[in-house]
Image (cartoon, rainbow, N blue to C red):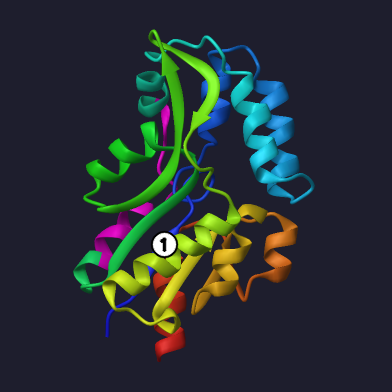
Amino acid sequence: MSRLIVTDVDSTFIRQEVVELLADHAGTRDLVQEVTERAMRGEIDFADSLAERVATLKDVPVSALAHVLAAVELTPGARELVAAVRARGWTFGLVSGGFGEIVAPLADSLGIGLWRANRLEVIDGRLTGRTEGPIVDRAVKETTLREWAAKLGIPMSRTVAVGDGANDLDMIRAAGVGVAFNAKPVVREQAPYSLEDRLDGVLELLDRLDG
C-alpha cells in the first residue's frame, strides 16, 4: 500500500537555513539567525518572524540566489530517502517555510514533483525585502499534507511528516506517522517519534512500525 512522505526543507532536508545563507549577502546573518532560532523554538509567530528576516534582505541582488543554491547541502540520507521512496512506489514531497527559488530547482534535481514554499518579491533584479502570496506557515503545511494525500487517494494514516521546528508541529500531529528530525526540544517533546543524524532513518522507523 502506498505512502506519502512529506518533509520540511531547511534544517531537515537540507543542512542549512536558506534565509541565513541569503543574509550573508546582506550582512545581516547574526540578526536573522537569532530570529530563526526564536521562531523554531515557537517563541514568536512564524509569519512575523519571516517578515522580519526577509526585510533584512532588501536590495540583495537576485544573482545571490544562484550562489545560495550552490551552497546548499543535502542532509545525510536525504537523497537515499527520496530514492527509496520512489523504489517502493510511494510519493515524496517537500513543504517549506523557505523559498521556492531554492526549493524548486532542488526538487527538480531530485525528481521530486510535489513541493510548496514561499516566494521572494523581486523588482529590477533585487529583492524587495518582501514575499509574494500566502505565507507557508504551520497551518499551510498541515493543509498541504492533507491536500496532497487527498489528491493521491492516500489515507492520512499512511502519511508521514518530518520536520525540526515549531512551524512543522501541525503537520507532524496530523500525519499518520509524525517525526521530529534533529529537532528543537519543543518539537521532540510533542512529536510521536524522534530521529537524529540521517534522514533515511525514517525508512527504518516505518519498517519497524509495519513489521
Q: Position of residue 174 (x, y in %)?
A: 55, 73
Residue reaching furthest front? 133
Residue 82 colored in magenta in the image: yes
Vertical placement of residue 191 versus 7, above or below: below
- The answer to whether residue 195 shows anywhere in this view is no
Vertical placement of residue 121 versus 119, above or below: above
Residue reaching furthest right? 43
Vertical placement of residue 100 versus 176, above or below: above
Residue 109 occupies which quadrant of the picture?
A: top left
Dot 1 alpha-carbon crowd within 10 angstroms: few under 14, some 14 to 19, many 20 or more: many
Residue 44 occupies which quadrant of the picture?
A: top right
- The answer to whether residue 140 shows anywhere in this view is yes
Quarter of the figure with the N terminus: bottom left
Q: Position of residue 69 (x, y in %)?
A: 37, 28
Residue 93 occupies which quadrant of the picture?
A: bottom left
Q: Which residue is mark 1?
A: 6
Disc 1 residue type (three-letter): Val
SS state under label 1: strand
Q: Nearer the viewer, residue 71 or 135?
A: 135
Q: Residue at horizontal 20%, vertical 73%?
A: 89
**The magenta segment:** 71-85
Q: Residue at horizontal 36%, vertical 72%?
A: 149
- Position of 13 with respect to 182 (left or right) is left
Q: Residue at horizontal 51%, vertical 30%?
A: 131
Vertical placement of residue 37 versus 186, above or below: above
What secondary structure is the stretch in magenta mostly built from? helix
